[in-house]
Structure formats: C-alpha cells, structure tokens
Image (spheres, grey):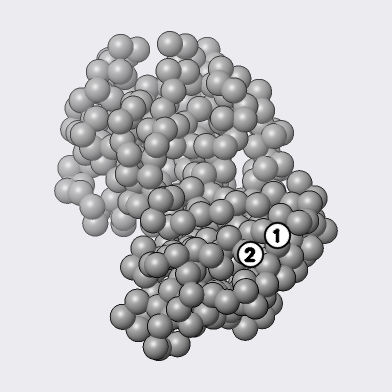
C-alpha cells in the first residue's frame, strides 16, 4: 500500500473495514482513522486513531521512526475517533508535546487523564517550524466540533482537514485517484449529509479560508486523500453547504395497513409525470443514513405517516428526529397520512417536524380516514405533480 503523500510525509492511520455504526450513521463502507507522520528535523504526528487501534497506530509510526523522535502530536479535533488513541501514544513518546488549540485542550482534559502531558497550545494563524517545513494552524469552529482546526503545511501545500472533505470509506488505497471518482464522491456526500450538514454556514466560512491557501493535497481524517480531484470535491461542497436543490423529489413514508402506502404511490405517480429524479423510501426498509444522503440535494419532499396510538409510527419518528438534528435547508414539501379515529399524530406531527426543520410547507396535510378513496388518491397525485413541477426548474 502506498502511504506516501510527499517525501517524508506518510499516512500512519488505521483502516476500520468492519465498523457499521458511527453514532447512528450506518457506515456500510467501513471507515478509516487517518493519522499522518511528518519526518523533518523535528517529527510530528497529525491526529490519532480510535482508542482500540492505538497499538497498531504506534507500531505503524515505529515502522518509520523511533518514538523518541516524535516532537509534536497535533490534535486537530477532540472527538474520540481521532483522540481515543492519543493517551497511549503520548505515553510512549517521551519527547512529544500535544499541539492543539485552547478549546481542544479543555476537551481533551475532560476526556482523558492528561496530567502528564506536555502542551503546546496554538491559536488561529500560529505556526511551528519542523526544520524544512512548518505547520500552520487554522481554527475551524463547528467543523465538526467547537475546537476543530486545520493544519496546513505550506512548503508541501498539504491541508490536513480533519473531518472536512472526509468519507467513511474503508479502502486498501489511500488516494482519491486509486478508487472510482463517483464512489469516492458518493461517500463524501454521505459523510457530509450525515455528519456535518447542520454546520453548512461554518463550513462555507472555512472553505473561504481554505480557498486563500495554495493547496495541492487535502488529507482528511477519514477516507481517501484528495490529490487529483480537489476541484471536484470543492465544487461539490459548494453545493452541499447550501443543500442546493436539484431536479429531484423524495417520497418518504411509513405505513401500517397500506393506506399511507397507497397515498405515497399516488404522490410518486404524479411526480413521475414530470422530468425529475424521484426517490421513494419506506422508513421500515431504508436506513436514515441513505434517506438523509438523498435529501441533501432534493428540491422537495413529501413525508407520510399513519396515526398509531395518537402519534407517529415509531420508525418515522426516529427518521424525523435524525433529520431535525441535521437540518437540511432549501427544501419544500408537505405531509400526508391515514388515520382511523383520531386526526392527532400521523400527518399532523409529520408537518410539525417539517416546520421545525424550516421546510417550506406547500399545502395542508393530505389525510385519509382509513383506506384512501379515488378522490384522495387524485389529490395525492396532483400534489406529486406540483412537487415535480417545482423541482423541474432546478439544474443538476
Ligand atoms: Fe471524525 Fe468529528 O470526528
């Protein structure tokens, strides 16, 4: 496996082939915890790995240099998938200082026993010389946590971007041009949607800062390293940070005795009369990870649930809770659903959730008492048509 980014800079992270859950994100493609070793007159390790893999991380570093040679261990982000292995690493690197910003220091102190650590606290714009190279630090609050920062090596034009531009994507290869671009961009999109979508504004600000730098390579803390397709991922991020709508609609539903399913089918039929990409998901058979990834760039969404025990179907409630946290923007849509004897719950609670997410509501909920009549199904078809016509105006 080629791990060399530039002469003297190597990937020393861990490939997690089998991880399938990342606090609710179904990581079907596994992940990697990227760490990088820079060997110069002084040596630095950029970021750590998840706790259980610290031994492998240390062995990986030792395959390049003695641990006594490590002068700096940079923590760009305190979340445990990157910091969990740092206590073990600090314990075996007698000459290492922990390099991080003040907020990160506080977060690390609240996670681990850091009483024996030597600290080198940096702020936005600071730099450290390694000899021929230097490390410059750029605070990137809320990308992904308040303490997050980028480390930039101007001499090699490499940006170590921690979670930004990452992918939960286990691969035997380390670089973007060693895997099909559509696969890598899809994983980057899923990662963006499921991890950082709610931080679109700070990410846009961070991208503006990054655009001022001369960058040849972006080395994130998950997935492959961008060395050939920086333009493509930058352009994609520019769309994702505003959840830019495309000619695409989504029908998302739960069903109990198929009444809401029939309504969903009719909405889809109406939308498919238009020149749009339509996606159709039953929350019982599609994981929220996939649903949120597809919502990122849709123009409109219809969401339906029957009423069960005066509220929503539980799986729909779970998906809406996940969506509300990630806050997709720039969408419009409406709610629908069947009920038996109580109009409370079901479509009403779906609409409440959509309003909370600031989805522009285009019409009152479409409801059906028990099984939908032909008139109600035509109402659904027409709502689908209107949704499709709206989405048609956008470009991919
Ligand atoms: Fe990969 Fe926010 O941690």
Task: Please provide percent x and percent y for residue 344.
Answer: 42, 87
Q: Residues within 10 Å of mark 2 (few under 14, many from 20)?
A: many
Q: Position of residue 232 (x, y in %)?
A: 69, 34
Query: Does any atom of ligand 1 lie closer than 8 Å to the CB of label 1?
Result: no
Q: Farthest front residue?
A: 374
Reading the image, the residue beneath label 1 is 271
Relative to 275, 283 lies left or right: left
Residue 319 at x, y = what percent? Answer: 42, 62
Q: Residue at x 45, y 65 (%)?
A: 258
* 195 shown above or below 320: above
Q: Quadrant of residue 48?
A: top left
Q: Which mark is residue 267?
A: 2
Locate residue 182: give its quadrant.
Answer: top right
Decide which of 125, 53 is in the foreground and name it.
Answer: 53
Judge by depth and name the residue closer to the eye, 288 or 130. 288
Can you say whether 250 is above or below 303 in the image? above
Q: Which mark is drawn over residue 207?
A: none
Q: Is residue 5 above or below residue 129?
A: above
């Amino acid at each position: 496996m080629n791990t060399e980014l530039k002469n003297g800079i190597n990937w020393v992270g861990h490939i997690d082939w089998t991880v399938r859950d990342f606090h609710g994100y179904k990581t079907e493609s596994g992940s990697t915890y990227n760490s990088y070793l820079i060997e110069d007159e002084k040596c630095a390790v950029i970021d750590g790995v998840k706790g259980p893999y610290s031994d492998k991380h240390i062995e990986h570093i030792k395959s390049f240099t003695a641990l006594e040679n490590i002068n700096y261990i940079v923590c760009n982000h305190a979340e445990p998938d990157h910091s969990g292995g740092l206590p073990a690493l600090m314990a075996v690197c007698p000459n290492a200082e922990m390099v991080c910003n003040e907020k990160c220091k506080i977060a690390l102190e609240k996670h681990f026993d850091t009483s024996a650590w030597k600290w080198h606290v940096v702020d936005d714009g600071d730099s450290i010389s390694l000899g021929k190279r230097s490390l410059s630090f750029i605070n990137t609050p809320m990308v992904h946590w308040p303490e997050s920062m980028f480390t930039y090596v101007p001499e090699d034009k490499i940006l170590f971007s921690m979670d930004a531009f990452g992918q939960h994507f286990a691969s035997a290869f380390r670089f973007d041009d060693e895997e099909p671009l559509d696969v890598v961009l899809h994983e980057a999109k899923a990662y963006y949607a499921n991890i950082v979508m709610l931080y679109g504004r700070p990410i846009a600000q961070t991208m503006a800062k990054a655009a001022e730098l001369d960058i040849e390579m972006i080395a994130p803390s998950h997935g492959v390293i961008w060395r050939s397709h920086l333009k493509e991922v930058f352009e994609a991020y520019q769309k994702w940070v505003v959840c830019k709508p495309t000619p695409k609609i989504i029908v998302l539903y739960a069903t109990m005795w198929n009444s809401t399913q029939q309504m969903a089918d009719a909405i889809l039929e109406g939308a498919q009369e238009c020149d749009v990409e339509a996606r159709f998901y039953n929350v019982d058979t599609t994981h929220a990870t996939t649903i949120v990834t597809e919502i990122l760039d849709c123009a409109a969404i219809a969401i339906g649930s029957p009423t069960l025990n005066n509220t929503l179907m539980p799986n729909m409630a779970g998906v809406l809770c996940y969506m509300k946290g990630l806050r997709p923007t720039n969408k419009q849509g409406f709610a629908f659903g069947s009920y038996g004897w109580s109009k409370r719950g079901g479509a009403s609670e779906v609409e409440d959730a959509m309003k909370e997410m600031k989805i522009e509501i285009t019409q009152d909920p479409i409801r059906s008492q028990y099984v939908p009549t032909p008139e109600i199904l035509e109402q659904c078809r027409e709502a689908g048509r209107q949704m499709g016509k709206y989405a048609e105006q956008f470009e991919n």
